[in-house]
Image (tube, coloured by chain):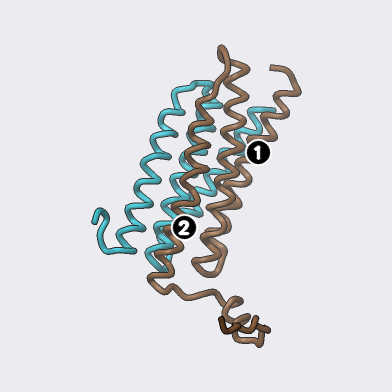
Amino acid sequence: MSPTTEVLLSLLILAGAAFTFIGSLGLVRFKDFYTRLHGPTKATTLGVGCLLAASSIFFSITGEGLSLHEILVSLFLFITAPISAHLLAKTALHQGLPLGFNITRQHDTDIPRMPIKDS
Amino acid sequence: MLNFALTLAFALVATAFAMSFFRLIKGPSAPDRILALDTLYINAIALLVLFGIQLASPLYFEAALLIALMGFVGTVALAKFLLRGDIIE
């Protein structure tokens, strides 16, 4: 393995692990459910995507031939992550979970609204 | 260098695991717990991929693919149960 590919692999692995970490950090630190939903669904998909790209490069170099079955996992995650996030948001709205502090404060102040036109 | 990056990545993903587990235990509402489970299975996929790179064995992808499939089905089933009171109507 040449030094260039080793540096590239290390960067991809570190970026993926950092994104996974940040996603879970958002899950712990955010105030209400709707903002908590935002953290993991975006960051972990990107994080696992980076890790799978690193793994694909690693096994293409060390193993025999091109290693492409990581794309299956990442494609599946890219398809299913929005669906599960959508279902979870629908569930939270159905249960009437409260909004966070900042969001309710914003609604209390006088934000100029668009006038509703009669059709 | 690759070994150092792998060790650091293991530490980061393990911390992410612990934080998702904290939300799973604490989470004030049921959707919070489902979201924590969702994050946990994605973290498990990341950990399996890292193991596969460290041991240089391509055996771990099948496990990662299976966890991705089953985790999605589980999340959808739980969310659907909370949403409709039934899974298959």
Q: Quadrant of residue A92?
A: bottom left
Crowding at dot 1, Cα within 10 Å, few <14 / some 14-19 / many 20+, comes out as: many
Q: Amino acid at mark 2?
A: His
Name above or below for residue A20 compared with residue B85: above
Q: Depth check: give the residue in front, A46 or A90.
A: A90
SS at circle 2: helix
Co-location on one chain, circles 1 and 2: yes
What residue appears at the point 68 percent right and 84 percent down from the top-left corner?
A: A112
Q: Quarter holding the C terminus of chain B?
A: bottom left
What residue appears at the point 66 percent right and 28 percent down from the top-left corner?
A: B2
Residue A6 circle label: none
- Chain A shown in which color? brown
SS at circle 1: helix
How far across and how far down the image is residue B21, in percent?
Answer: 44, 54
- Label 1 and label 2: CA atoms lie apart by 29 Å
Q: Depth check: give the residue in front, A69 or B34.
A: A69
Q: What letter labels the chain drawn in cyan?
A: B
Name above or below for residue B38 compared with residue A5: below
Residue assigned mark 1: A14
Residue assigned mark 2: A86
Q: Is residue A4 left or right of residue A51?
A: right
Q: Residue furthest right?
A: A4
Q: Amino acid at mark 1?
A: Leu
How far across and how far down the image is residue B74, in percent?
Answer: 35, 48
